[in-house]
Protein backbone atom coordinates (compact mmCIF):
# COMPACT_ATOMS: atom_id res chain seq x y z
CA UNK A 1 0.00 0.00 0.00
CA UNK A 2 1.49 3.31 -1.03
CA UNK A 3 2.09 5.73 1.83
CA UNK A 4 1.73 8.58 -0.63
CA UNK A 5 -1.90 7.86 -1.31
CA UNK A 6 -4.09 10.87 -0.55
CA UNK A 7 -7.77 11.36 -1.23
CA UNK A 8 -9.54 14.59 -0.29
CA UNK A 9 -13.12 13.82 0.73
CA UNK A 10 -14.48 17.33 1.28
CA UNK A 11 -14.53 20.10 -1.31
CA UNK A 12 -16.87 22.51 -3.03
CA UNK A 13 -17.34 23.66 -6.63
CA UNK A 14 -19.32 26.33 -8.46
CA UNK A 15 -22.35 24.03 -8.03
CA UNK A 16 -22.42 25.50 -4.50
CA UNK A 17 -20.03 28.05 -3.02
CA UNK A 18 -16.67 26.95 -4.44
CA UNK A 19 -14.86 29.00 -7.09
CA UNK A 20 -13.69 26.18 -9.41
CA UNK A 21 -16.00 24.39 -11.79
CA UNK A 22 -16.39 20.62 -11.22
CA UNK A 23 -14.21 19.98 -14.26
CA UNK A 24 -11.49 22.36 -13.02
CA UNK A 25 -11.57 20.80 -9.57
CA UNK A 26 -11.07 17.22 -10.85
CA UNK A 27 -8.19 18.38 -13.06
CA UNK A 28 -6.71 20.33 -10.14
CA UNK A 29 -6.87 17.25 -7.88
CA UNK A 30 -5.16 15.06 -10.49
CA UNK A 31 -2.49 17.71 -11.13
CA UNK A 32 -1.44 17.96 -7.49
CA UNK A 33 -1.18 14.16 -7.26
CA UNK A 34 -4.28 13.33 -5.26
CA UNK A 35 -5.42 9.77 -5.94
CA UNK A 36 -9.05 10.17 -5.04
CA UNK A 37 -11.62 12.86 -4.47
CA UNK A 38 -15.17 13.39 -3.36
CA UNK A 39 -16.99 16.59 -4.28
CA UNK A 40 -19.26 17.51 -1.39
CA UNK A 41 -21.20 20.56 -2.47
CA UNK A 42 -23.82 21.97 -0.11
CA UNK A 43 -27.16 20.25 -0.76
CA UNK A 44 -26.55 19.42 -4.43
CA UNK A 45 -24.99 16.66 -6.54
CA UNK A 46 -25.11 18.76 -9.68
CA UNK A 47 -21.31 18.87 -10.00
CA UNK A 48 -21.21 15.18 -10.93
CA UNK A 49 -22.80 15.61 -14.34
CA UNK A 50 -19.70 17.44 -15.56
CA UNK A 51 -17.14 16.03 -13.08
CA UNK A 52 -17.69 12.36 -13.95
CA UNK A 53 -16.86 12.63 -17.68
CA UNK A 54 -13.55 14.38 -16.85
CA UNK A 55 -12.74 11.86 -14.12
CA UNK A 56 -13.34 9.05 -16.66
CA UNK A 57 -11.00 10.64 -19.22
CA UNK A 58 -8.29 11.12 -16.58
CA UNK A 59 -9.00 7.68 -14.99
CA UNK A 60 -9.32 9.56 -11.72
CA UNK A 61 -11.29 7.89 -8.88
CA UNK A 62 -14.19 10.18 -8.03
CA UNK A 63 -16.46 9.19 -5.15
CA UNK A 64 -20.01 10.55 -4.95
CA UNK A 65 -20.63 12.89 -2.03
CA UNK A 66 -22.79 15.73 -0.76
CA UNK A 67 -22.85 17.94 2.36
CA UNK A 68 -26.32 18.41 3.81
CA UNK A 69 -27.17 21.38 6.01
CA UNK A 70 -29.18 20.18 9.00
CA UNK A 71 -30.08 21.28 12.50
CA UNK A 72 -29.93 19.68 15.92
CA UNK A 73 -31.43 21.67 18.80
CA UNK A 74 -30.91 24.97 16.95
CA UNK A 75 -27.28 24.08 16.26
CA UNK A 76 -26.18 23.95 12.60
CA UNK A 77 -24.88 20.46 11.81
CA UNK A 78 -23.39 19.44 8.47
CA UNK A 79 -23.84 15.83 7.42
CA UNK A 80 -21.76 14.31 4.65
CA UNK A 81 -23.15 11.43 2.60
CA UNK A 82 -20.84 9.30 0.46
CA UNK A 83 -21.05 6.49 -2.03
CA UNK A 84 -24.68 6.72 -3.21
CA UNK A 85 -25.66 5.92 -6.78
CA UNK A 86 -26.25 9.17 -8.65
CA UNK A 87 -29.67 7.97 -9.76
CA UNK A 88 -30.77 7.22 -6.19
CA UNK A 89 -34.32 8.59 -5.76
CA UNK A 90 -33.94 9.38 -2.04
CA UNK A 91 -30.89 11.55 -2.66
CA UNK A 92 -32.77 13.33 -5.46
CA UNK A 93 -35.72 14.00 -3.13
CA UNK A 94 -33.43 15.30 -0.40
CA UNK A 95 -31.69 17.67 -2.79
CA UNK A 96 -35.01 19.04 -4.04
CA UNK A 97 -36.42 19.59 -0.55
CA UNK A 98 -33.18 21.25 0.60
CA UNK A 99 -33.32 23.57 -2.39
CA UNK A 100 -36.85 24.68 -1.41
CA UNK A 101 -35.79 25.26 2.19
CA UNK A 102 -32.86 27.38 1.01
CA UNK A 103 -34.98 29.41 -1.38
CA UNK A 104 -37.33 30.29 1.48
CA UNK A 105 -34.47 31.15 3.79
CA UNK A 106 -32.68 33.25 1.18
CA UNK A 107 -35.90 35.23 0.61
CA UNK A 108 -36.05 35.98 4.34
CA UNK A 109 -32.40 37.11 4.39
CA UNK A 110 -32.95 39.35 1.35
CA UNK A 111 -36.01 40.83 3.01
CA UNK A 112 -34.01 41.48 6.20
CA UNK A 113 -31.34 43.20 4.12
CA UNK A 114 -33.99 45.30 2.40
CA UNK A 115 -35.19 46.50 5.79
CA UNK A 116 -31.62 47.61 6.41
CA UNK A 117 -31.65 49.57 3.15
CA UNK A 118 -29.69 47.00 1.12
CA UNK A 119 -31.59 45.93 -1.99
CA UNK A 120 -30.50 42.69 -3.63
CA UNK A 121 -32.72 40.73 -6.01
CA UNK A 122 -32.86 36.94 -6.25
CA UNK A 123 -31.58 37.18 -9.83
CA UNK A 124 -28.39 38.83 -8.59
CA UNK A 125 -27.57 35.64 -6.64
CA UNK A 126 -27.31 33.47 -9.75
CA UNK A 127 -29.82 31.42 -11.64
CA UNK A 128 -28.16 28.09 -12.49
CA UNK A 129 -30.88 25.45 -12.24
CA UNK A 130 -29.54 22.88 -9.79
CA UNK A 131 -26.86 24.93 -8.12
CA UNK A 132 -27.03 25.74 -4.44
CA UNK A 133 -27.29 29.39 -3.52
CA UNK A 134 -26.07 30.22 -0.05
CA UNK A 135 -24.95 33.08 2.11
CA UNK A 136 -21.59 33.43 0.30
CA UNK A 137 -23.54 34.29 -2.89
CA UNK A 138 -25.50 36.93 -1.00
CA UNK A 139 -22.23 38.32 0.38
CA UNK A 140 -20.71 38.42 -3.12
CA UNK A 141 -23.72 40.32 -4.46
CA UNK A 142 -23.30 42.77 -1.58
CA UNK A 143 -19.61 43.19 -2.45
CA UNK A 144 -20.50 43.89 -6.07
CA UNK A 145 -22.78 46.68 -4.87
CA UNK A 146 -20.02 48.08 -2.67
CA UNK A 147 -22.02 47.53 0.53
CA UNK A 148 -19.20 45.49 2.05
CA UNK A 149 -15.54 45.01 1.15
CA UNK A 150 -15.07 41.33 1.95
CA UNK A 151 -17.01 38.11 2.51
CA UNK A 152 -15.77 38.19 6.05
CA UNK A 153 -17.28 41.63 6.61
CA UNK A 154 -20.54 40.35 5.12
CA UNK A 155 -20.71 37.49 7.61
CA UNK A 156 -19.47 39.55 10.56
CA UNK A 157 -21.96 42.38 10.03
CA UNK A 158 -24.99 40.86 8.31
CA UNK A 159 -25.03 37.16 7.48
CA UNK A 160 -23.34 35.26 10.30
CA UNK A 161 -25.46 33.48 12.92
CA UNK A 162 -27.30 36.05 15.01
CA UNK A 163 -26.20 39.02 12.84
CA UNK A 164 -28.46 41.77 11.48
CA UNK A 165 -29.86 39.98 8.40
CA UNK A 166 -29.48 36.36 9.53
CA UNK A 167 -32.31 33.89 9.29
CA UNK A 168 -31.75 30.17 9.82
CA UNK A 169 -34.83 29.20 7.82
CA UNK A 170 -36.59 25.90 8.43
CA UNK A 171 -33.82 23.36 8.36
CA UNK A 172 -34.00 19.58 8.03
CA UNK A 173 -33.22 17.91 11.34
CA UNK A 174 -30.16 15.75 11.60
CA UNK A 175 -32.14 12.60 12.43
CA UNK A 176 -34.18 12.92 9.23
CA UNK A 177 -31.02 13.39 7.20
CA UNK A 178 -29.53 10.25 8.75
CA UNK A 179 -32.56 8.07 8.06
CA UNK A 180 -32.77 9.29 4.46
CA UNK A 181 -29.03 8.76 3.88
CA UNK A 182 -29.42 5.18 5.17
CA UNK A 183 -32.38 4.69 2.86
CA UNK A 184 -30.12 5.74 -0.02
CA UNK A 185 -27.57 3.10 1.14
CA UNK A 186 -25.00 5.87 1.48
CA UNK A 187 -22.37 6.36 4.19
CA UNK A 188 -23.31 9.08 6.71
CA UNK A 189 -20.47 11.11 8.20
CA UNK A 190 -20.63 13.87 10.81
CA UNK A 191 -18.74 16.78 9.22
CA UNK A 192 -16.20 18.96 11.10
CA UNK A 193 -17.31 17.92 14.63
CA UNK A 194 -14.97 20.51 16.17
CA UNK A 195 -17.33 23.22 14.84
CA UNK A 196 -20.24 21.95 16.94
CA UNK A 197 -20.23 24.59 19.66
CA UNK A 198 -22.13 22.89 22.48
CA UNK A 199 -20.49 19.87 24.14
CA UNK A 200 -23.89 18.46 25.06
CA UNK A 201 -25.04 18.57 21.44
CA UNK A 202 -21.85 16.84 20.32
CA UNK A 203 -22.38 14.08 22.89
CA UNK A 204 -25.92 13.56 21.60
CA UNK A 205 -24.66 13.46 18.00
CA UNK A 206 -22.16 10.76 18.96
CA UNK A 207 -25.11 8.57 19.96
CA UNK A 208 -26.75 8.88 16.53
CA UNK A 209 -26.38 6.29 13.78
CA UNK A 210 -23.53 7.86 11.81
CA UNK A 211 -21.12 5.59 9.93
CA UNK A 212 -18.19 7.94 10.08
CA UNK A 213 -16.64 11.00 11.69
CA UNK A 214 -14.71 13.68 9.82
CA UNK A 215 -11.60 13.60 12.01
CA UNK A 216 -9.09 15.20 9.64
CA UNK A 217 -9.98 18.69 8.55
CA UNK A 218 -8.07 21.62 7.07
CA UNK A 219 -5.89 23.58 9.47
CA UNK A 220 -6.63 21.32 12.44
CA UNK A 221 -3.79 20.67 14.86
CA UNK A 222 -2.75 17.08 15.62
CA UNK A 223 -3.82 17.37 19.27
CA UNK A 224 -7.28 18.48 18.19
CA UNK A 225 -7.63 15.56 15.77
CA UNK A 226 -6.77 12.74 18.18
CA UNK A 227 -9.91 12.82 20.38
CA UNK A 228 -12.04 12.45 17.26
CA UNK A 229 -9.92 9.59 15.92
CA UNK A 230 -10.31 7.87 19.31
CA UNK A 231 -14.05 8.50 19.29
CA UNK A 232 -14.41 7.01 15.80
CA UNK A 233 -12.45 3.95 16.89
CA UNK A 234 -14.66 3.42 19.96
CA UNK A 235 -17.80 3.74 17.86
CA UNK A 236 -16.48 1.55 15.05
CA UNK A 237 -16.97 4.51 12.70
CA UNK A 238 -14.83 5.34 9.68
CA UNK A 239 -12.40 8.22 10.35
CA UNK A 240 -12.69 10.43 7.29
CA UNK A 241 -11.02 13.68 6.26
CA UNK A 242 -10.96 16.45 3.77
CA UNK A 243 -9.90 20.03 3.24
CA UNK A 244 -13.30 21.75 2.79
CA UNK A 245 -11.69 23.43 -0.20
CA UNK A 246 -13.70 26.34 -1.62
CA UNK A 247 -11.06 27.83 -3.96
CA UNK A 248 -10.85 31.63 -3.92
CA UNK A 249 -13.78 31.88 -1.53
CA UNK A 250 -11.60 30.55 1.31
CA UNK A 251 -8.12 31.26 -0.04
CA UNK A 252 -6.36 30.08 3.12
CA UNK A 253 -7.40 26.46 2.44
CA UNK A 254 -5.56 24.47 -0.24
CA UNK A 255 -6.93 21.39 -1.98
CA UNK A 256 -5.60 18.26 -0.28
CA UNK A 257 -4.88 20.09 3.01
CA UNK A 258 -6.54 17.12 4.71
CA UNK A 259 -7.04 13.68 3.26
CA UNK A 260 -7.62 9.98 3.89
CA UNK A 261 -5.33 7.09 3.01
CA UNK A 262 -5.84 4.25 0.58
CA UNK A 263 -7.63 1.84 2.91
CA UNK A 264 -10.34 4.32 3.90
CA UNK A 265 -10.82 5.57 0.37
CA UNK A 266 -11.09 2.00 -0.97
CA UNK A 267 -13.78 1.15 1.56
CA UNK A 268 -15.89 4.13 0.48
CA UNK A 269 -15.17 3.74 -3.22
CA UNK A 270 -16.06 0.01 -3.21
CA UNK A 271 -19.31 0.88 -1.44
CA UNK A 272 -20.04 3.42 -4.19
CA UNK A 273 -19.31 0.94 -6.96
CA UNK A 274 -21.60 -1.64 -5.39
CA UNK A 275 -24.40 0.93 -5.23
CA UNK A 276 -23.80 1.98 -8.85
CA UNK A 277 -23.90 -1.59 -10.17
CA UNK A 278 -27.11 -2.31 -8.21
CA UNK A 279 -28.87 0.85 -9.39
P1 LIG B 1 -25.16 28.62 3.94
O1 LIG B 1 -24.87 27.21 3.50
O2 LIG B 1 -25.89 29.39 2.94
O3 LIG B 1 -25.75 28.69 5.32
O4 LIG B 1 -23.74 29.34 4.04
C1 LIG B 1 -22.73 28.71 4.81
C2 LIG B 1 -21.42 28.75 4.05
O5 LIG B 1 -20.92 30.07 4.11
C3 LIG B 1 -20.34 27.91 4.70
O6 LIG B 1 -20.34 26.60 4.24
C4 LIG B 1 -19.09 28.61 4.28
O7 LIG B 1 -18.71 28.21 2.99
C5 LIG B 1 -19.51 30.05 4.23
N1 LIG B 1 -19.16 30.81 5.44
C6 LIG B 1 -19.62 30.63 6.69
N2 LIG B 1 -19.11 31.56 7.53
C7 LIG B 1 -18.28 32.33 6.79
C8 LIG B 1 -17.45 33.47 7.06
N3 LIG B 1 -17.36 34.00 8.30
N4 LIG B 1 -16.76 34.01 6.04
C9 LIG B 1 -16.86 33.50 4.80
N5 LIG B 1 -17.62 32.44 4.48
C10 LIG B 1 -18.32 31.86 5.45
ZN1 LIG C 1 -19.36 26.24 1.81
FE1 LIG D 1 -19.56 22.35 6.34
FE1 LIG E 1 -18.00 22.11 3.30
Image (tube, rainbow, N blue to C red):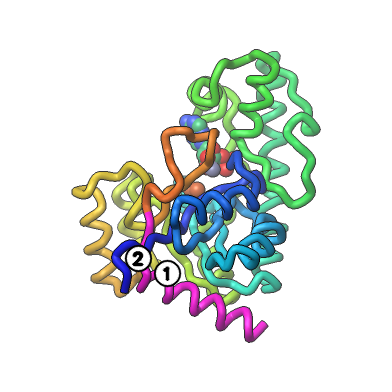
Rendered position, 184 above or below 98: below
Q: Is residue 54 magenta?
A: no
Q: Position of residue 135 (x, y in %)?
A: 60, 35
Residue 265 circle label: 1
Asked whether residue 39 appears in the rendered view, the answer is yes
Q: Position of residue 227 (x, y in %)?
A: 22, 56
Residue drawn at x 67%, y 82% is: 279
Element type where label 1 sits in the image:
helix
Give the magenta range. 259-279
Residue drawn at x 66%, y 55% is: 47
The residue under label 2 is 261
Rendered position, 55 above or below 122: below
Residue drawn at x 22%, y 63% is: 230
Characterize the magenta stretch by its predominant secondary structure. Answer: helix
Determine the CA span between mark 2 and mark 1: 6 Å
Q: Position of residue 133 (x, y in %)?
A: 67, 41
Q: Is mark 2 within 8 Å of ligand 4?
A: no
* Apparent side of residue 63 relative to residue 237 in the rendered image (left or right): right
Asked whether residue 161 appears in the rendered view, the answer is no
Task: Please tell me which residue lies in front, 115 or 13.
Answer: 13
- Contact, CB < 8 Å: mark 2 with mark 1? yes
Q: Is residue 264 magenta?
A: yes
Q: Residues within 10 Å of mark 2 (few under 14, many from 20)?
A: some
Task: Please tell me which residue lies in front, 221 or 211.
Answer: 221
Amino acid sequence: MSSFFRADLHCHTTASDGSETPEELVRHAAEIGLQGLSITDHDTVDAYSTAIPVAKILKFPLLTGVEFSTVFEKEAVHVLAYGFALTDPTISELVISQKKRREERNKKILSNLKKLGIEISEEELGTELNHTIGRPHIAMAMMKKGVIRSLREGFDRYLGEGKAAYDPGVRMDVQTALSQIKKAKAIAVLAHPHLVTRKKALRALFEMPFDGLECYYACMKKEAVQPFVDRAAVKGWIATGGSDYHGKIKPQIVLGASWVGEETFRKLYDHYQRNETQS
